Amino acid sequence: MAISADDLCIDIENACSILEKDGITIDSKDEMMAVFKWNDMETTLYTQGKVMFFPLEDKPKCIAYATELLEKLVS
């Protein structure tokens, strides 16, 4: 799991709209999180800016992927 160094408050509905425009299917969502496939991994995005990738155990890749994803959603 990667956690943003900045305090974030992700709007899950807006984030899902952005992801869906990129062709990503949202598997499930509620007001606190969204689950979807991204880069062939199950990805969970939380409102606080936390991102969990499964299966991924490489910390540097996790940070790089989370940064890439969050930059797309928070810009």
Image: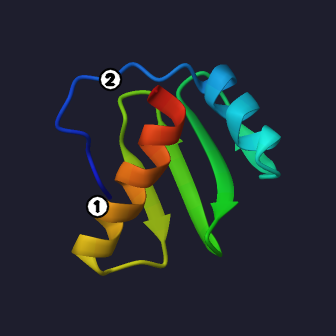
Q: Which mark is residue 8?
A: 2
Image position of 44 with respect to 41: above or below: above
Distance from Cα at disc 1 to Cα at disc 2: 16 Å
Q: Position of residue 22 (x, y in %)?
A: 76, 47
Left or right: where does residue 60 sit relative to residue 24? left
Q: Amino acid at mark 2?
A: Leu
Between 40 and 28, the residue placed more toward the observer is 40
Looking at the image, tell me whether mark 1 or mark 2 is earlier in sequence order: 2
Q: Residue furthest front?
A: 75
Residue at the spot 51% in from the left edge and 43% down from the top edge = 45
Left or right: where does residue 56 sit relative to residue 28? left
Q: Position of residue 23 (x, y in %)?
A: 82, 51
Left or right: where does residue 51 sit relative to residue 6? right
Dot 2 alpha-carbon crowd within 10 angstroms: few under 14, some 14 to 19, many 20 or more: some
Image position of 16 with respect to 8: above or below: below
Q: Quadrant of residue 43?
A: bottom right
List the residue tagged with mark 1: 63
Secondary element under disc 2, as helix, strand or loop, is loop
